[in-house]
Amino acid sequence: MNGAQALIRTLVNCGVDTCFMNPGTSEMHFVAALDDVPEMHSVLALFEGVATGAADGYARVSGKPAAVLLHLGPGLGNGLANLHNARRGHTPVVNIVGDHATYHAQYDAPLQSDIASIASAVSGWMHSATDATEVAGDAAAAIHASMQRPGQVATLILPADVCWNDAPGPAEQIGTGRGPEGVDAAAVAAAADALRSGEPAAILIGGALMRTDGLRWSASVAETTGAKLLSETFPAIMDRGAGIAPVERLAYLAEFAQMQLDGLRHLIVVGAAHPVSFFAYPGKASDLVPEGCNVVSLAAEDADLLAAMAALAEAVGADGTCTVQGSFRPERPTGALTAQTVCEALGALLPEGAVVADEGNTAGLFAPGATAGAPAHEWMCLTGGSIGYGMPVATGAGIAVKGTGRRVVNLQADGSALYTLQSLWTQAREELDVTTIILNNSSYAVLNMELARVGAEPGPKALEMLDISRPDLDFVALSKGMGVPATRATTAEEFVAQLEAALSTPGPNLVEAVIPSTL
């Protein structure tokens, strides 16, 4: 057994049975070893940013780490944006980066780079393998590190000779990797006192509390104490829909978030970050918490959040019962096709158990409201703000639910689709049940909005840099070129019919919705 075989067998032994990759010369022994470990599902991506984003999406939906294999520093660089999103989403990813053979590094070959420095920006754990006899243990350590609560990117740098040299065999899993246990009694008491004070209070939740049980206990505490319940702006994954406790997400725009927090005297933060503006704006605050508001951190992101919320519930007398979201759907829209009617159609047709990868950006503004009462589903958000996430994450989610009868829906803005369009090819090759909705308004609309918010005064040249027409993009042709069937809708009736057909047809497909450049 060589080092590559021992490494892959260790991954499988530890429950990591899916690896997304875009390999090169230094990783050829890893690739060759795939035939010796048939339990490993290897998925090829045509661009590293697709591989890293797919690993993120797979882990979010499956609840277990995915592996990704990249080629040297440049390959890692190409995949960095979606590793950033995975880091921000606390996703467990085992990031394997091939390197030159240990003895070859001294010659500074053209592809030699400082992989460790590049990887450090997105990695919660990092190690460079140096010996084939130890690489299996290195892999087990990487898996263990990735699963440390709340989850993180663990990077293993893998020199080529470590792969081809002899190894004694695979390693077994190291514990569960869950991380800190227990509840801070003092924090529970402080939060309970704040909620019982009779003064305006809110609970801001994130992480594991965005799943059904966490939402139920959080809503029960809020209803018992009269507090407002809010969640982080972009949760990695959340349960929502009919029968699930609803939660109001903190707004992306700082002005709206400040309105949600206005008047609070107490803010209980549980598994979420302190509310801050996404960007700095002239004359506007960066910290969004009202002046004089008492902020109580009940549990940090790496804590046992369910246990912390259950302890708080006991302290305030909440029994876990709460109001749940009622069932409703918008009427199937007719007439003009706009951002709003696209989202109404999605709400009318979204199937039960669907997984939504939301990168609708400005044109997807209406989607949360339109789908709130749809049958229970999962919703994934752009955790780190780095666009080009939606199509790869939908691809990974498609791998995670393959064979279950569940559908993945990618609500996708046109501009950010172009960053990782190669995802469609992987969806076709893997025959994934993914429906992509392209919101085609021929504009980087979010940047048009931000021009005014930062106080810039654009002229014609500036506006051209935010316009992606001339030539107009043909997403139907682009999709078909990648092997994915596609249609184009220009009216609400066309879109409803095409989306309904797409959601009921096995395999990947794409519906291009041509909408105005303004909401």
Image (cartoon, rainbow, N blue to C red):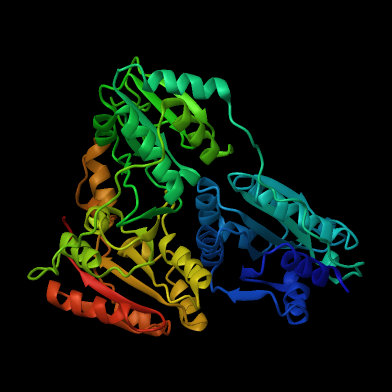
Looking at the image, residue 50 sits to the left or right of residue 335; the answer is right
For the N terminus, the image quarter is bottom right
Q: Does any portion of residue 441 appear in the rendered image?
A: no
Q: Which residue is drawn at 25% across and 76% down?
A: 499
Q: In this view, does 473 lie above or below 454?
A: below
Picture coordinates of residue 119 (x, y %)? 65, 50
Looking at the image, residue 169 sits to the left or right of residue 445; the answer is right
Picture coordinates of residue 87 (x, y %)? 55, 48
The residue closer to the viewer here, 24 or 158, is: 158
The residue closer to the viewer here, 350 or 170, is: 350
The residue closer to the viewer here, 14 or 516, is: 14
For the C terminus, the image quarter is bottom left
Picture coordinates of residue 289 (x, y %)? 35, 25
Q: Does any portion of residue 265 appear in the rendered image?
A: yes
Using the rendered view, name the quadrant where residue 267 is placed.
top left
Picture coordinates of residue 503 (x, y %)? 32, 77
Q: Is residue 469 above or below residue 80?
A: below
Q: Which residue is drawn at 53% across and 39% down?
A: 305
Using the rendered view, name the quadrant where residue 69 is placed.
bottom right
Q: How many labels does the image show?
A: 0
Q: Which residue is drawn at 29% across and 44% down?
A: 323
